[in-house]
């Protein structure tokens, strides 16, 4: 039942609880209790609106691979704080392999990316920065696969 609720909410979290319950065969109150339990347990972190990046003038996606020779905790903490101050960075990952970090950056154009890049390197020392511009978005989803939801979660 919870997986069905999560699937529906991932598609449209604005649906009334009564409609969600109707779709999965539950009355409103038990459906609402299940949703509240999923929120309290942290399975549902938050409900958001997904915006059209082109319509808000952030239609250029850049994947930025970063390598560094600095691996002290002090540098890592500073780097994480620096990245959090850049609203253009919409995803930020620590990686395994040759690349230490991967960023997904959204900007209006290449000129604004160049500005972002200059501001970034002015704030923190990096060994190598490589940028790849997305030419076409073929798939984008925020919907997580729920086939694994019945397995024990990893924390």
Image (spheres, rainbow, N blue to C red):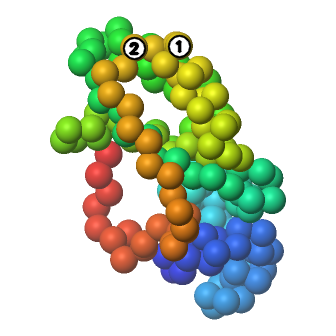
In the image, 62 versus 111, the foreground residue is: 111
- Quarter of image, res 111: top right
Q: Residue at x 71, y 68 (%)?
A: 13
Q: Is residue 92 left or right of residue 28?
A: left
Pointer 2: what residue? 125
- Mark 2 residue crowding within 10 angstroms, few (<14) / some (14–19) / many (20+): few
In the image, 82 versus 16, the foreground residue is: 82
- Quarter of image, res 130: top left
Q: Residue at x 53, y 63 (%)?
A: 135
Q: Position of residue 46 (x, y in %)?
A: 64, 51
Relative to 40, say whether 125 is above or below.
above
In the image, 21 versus 146, the foreground residue is: 146
Q: Residue at x 51, y 73 (%)?
A: 138
Q: Position of residue 48 (x, y in %)?
A: 71, 55
Q: Which residue is at the far left? A: 97
Relative to 119, say whether 133 is above or below.
below
Q: Position of residue 142 (x, y in %)?
A: 55, 64
Pointer 1: what residue? 122
Q: Is residue 123 left or right of residue 106?
A: left
- Mark 1 residue crowding within 10 angstroms, few (<14) / some (14–19) / many (20+): few
Q: Which residue is at the far front? A: 111
Q: Residue at x 32, y 57 (%)?
A: 153
Q: Position of residue 141 (x, y in %)?
A: 55, 68
Identify the mark at residue 153; answer none if there is no mark: none
In the image, 98 versus 87, the foreground residue is: 98
* SS label for mark 2: loop
């Amino acid at each position: 039942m919870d997986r069905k609720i999560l699937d529906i909410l991932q598609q449209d979290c604005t649906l009334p609880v009564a409609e969600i319950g109707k779709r999965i065969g539950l009355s409103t109150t038990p459906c609402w209790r299940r949703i509240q339990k999923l929120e309290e347990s942290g399975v549902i972190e938050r409900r958001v609106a997904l915006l059209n990046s082109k319509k808000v003038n952030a239609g250029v996606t850049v994947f930025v691979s970063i390598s560094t020779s600095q691996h002290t905790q002090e540098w890592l903490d500073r780097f994480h704080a620096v990245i959090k101050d850049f609203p253009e960075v919409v995803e930020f990952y620590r990686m395994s392999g040759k690349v230490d970090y991967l960023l997904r950056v959204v900007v209006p154009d290449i000129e604004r990316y160049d500005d972002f890049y200059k501001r970034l390197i002015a704030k923190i020392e990096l060994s190598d920065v490589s940028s790849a511009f997305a030419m076409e978005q073929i798939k984008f989803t925020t919907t997580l696969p729920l086939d694994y939801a019945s397995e024990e979660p990893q924390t």
